[in-house]
Image: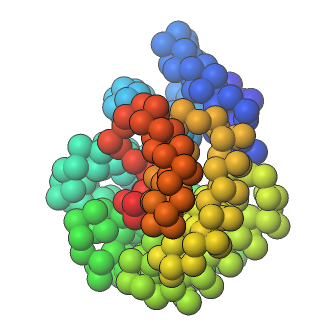
């Protein structure tokens, strides 16, 4: 359990066969005999973003049900929750956020928005002053604003999305002494910000944000990591938006190489890169290359549920 838990948390240290890890996680949930509910709940909570990262979304509703069941068991027992910290609040808020994500998958954006706003209200009802603030609570609040921003984007409310994302990043900055500016969650927020800047055609600022993202990844993870592949992909999207085909090709081919090496070809990340390369070569009148990526797309399994940045296609 400890090793699998570490894999779920170790962003940038991607295993070669994530599907095998995910099948192990699912098997554990089917067969485990729980003798430590607090540990198991944390294990389940960290399992959710790992499965979501690799787009194993069919299993997520079952996982959320198990998280809710375990949370309720702990609340009924009454002896697993500390009374002097924010664990109880964070567990309830995280459950709301995961339920909201399931609603996003169903395109029920209004209800998802309400759940995330409720989660934010619960956390903000406890003042995050210097005495109350802790890494988990503040990071969770920042992530909630980031996820709220994602919902606003899907609802086509860019100004509300920008305000929520600005709030997410400002919370991290205000509590930088907790180490919140050196976490993987900040990378996701930077990618979301890049999305919005590209959509608003502020290409210079998008390039600056991507440079910050790239420098952070290279410092902590290196150039052959999943996060660096996402950086290359977004650089390709930016170059295509600016109408620079040669740069677009270099970035997207680099992203394809890393993603297929880390995850293989049977995933939506590779499929998204194929879409952009097909688009590029079709515009560039390179018919043979366009046809080859069209064939890759047709041979990929269909999945309408894409990751948070793929809406740019």
Return the residue nearer the eye: 60 or 285. 285
Q: Is residue 293 left or right of residue 216?
A: left
- In the image, what residue occupies the spot 31% across and 68% down? 153
Residue 289: x and y in percent read 56, 51
- In the image, what residue occupies the spot 75% across and 45% down? 13
Q: Is residue 236 left or right of residue 279?
A: right
Return the residue nearer the eye: 280 or 205. 280
- In the image, what residue occupies the spot 47% across and 38% down? 295
Displayed quadrant of residue 136: bottom right
Residue 133: x and y in percent read 56, 69
Please determine whether, in this image, residue 313 is positioned above or below residue 22.
below
Please determine whether, in this image, residue 210 is positioned above or below residue 281.
below
Q: Confirm whether residue 271 shows in the render.
A: no
- In the image, what residue occupies the spot 24% across and 60% down? 113
Residue 116: x and y in percent read 30, 59
In the rendered image, the quadrant that contains the C terminus is: bottom left
Residue 31: x and y in percent read 53, 10
């Amino acid at each position: 359990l400890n090793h699998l838990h570490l894999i779920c948390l170790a962003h940038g240290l991607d295993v070669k066969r994530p599907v095998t890890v995910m099948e192990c996680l699912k098997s554990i949930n089917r067969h485990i005999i729980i003798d430590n509910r607090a540990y198991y709940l944390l294990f389940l909570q960290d399992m959710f973003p790992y499965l979501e990262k690799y787009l194993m979304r069919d299993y997520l509703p079952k996982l959320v049900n198990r998280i809710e069941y375990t949370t309720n068991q702990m609340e009924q027992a009454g002896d697993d929750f500390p009374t002097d910290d924010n664990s109880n609040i964070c567990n309830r808020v995280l459950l709301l956020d995961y339920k909201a994500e399931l609603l996003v998958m169903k395109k029920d954006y209004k209800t998802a928005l309400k759940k995330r706003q409720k989660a934010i209200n619960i956390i903000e009802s406890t003042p995050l002053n210097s005495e109350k603030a802790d890494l988990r609570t503040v990071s969770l609040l920042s992530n909630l604003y980031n996820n709220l921003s994602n919902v606003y984007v899907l609802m086509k409310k860019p100004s509300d999305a920008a305000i929520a994302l600005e709030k997410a990043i400002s919370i991290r900055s205000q509590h930088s002494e907790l180490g919140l500016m050196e976490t993987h969650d900040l990378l996701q927020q930077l990618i979301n910000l890049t999305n919005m800047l590209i959509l608003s055609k502020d290409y210079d600022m998008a390039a600056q944000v991507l440079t910050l993202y790239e420098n952070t990844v290279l410092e902590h993870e290196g150039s052959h990591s999943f996060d660096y592949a996402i950086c290359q992909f977004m650089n390709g999207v930016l170059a295509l938006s600016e109408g620079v085909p040669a740069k677009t090709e270099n970035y997207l081919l680099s992203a394809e190489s890393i993603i297929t090496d880390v995850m293989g070809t049977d995933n939506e990340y590779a499929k998204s890169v194929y879409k952009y390369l097909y688009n590029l070569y079709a515009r560039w009148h390179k018919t043979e290359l366009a046809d080859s990526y069209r064939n890759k797309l047709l041979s990929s399994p269909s999945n309408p549920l894409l990751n948070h940045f793929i809406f740019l296609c």
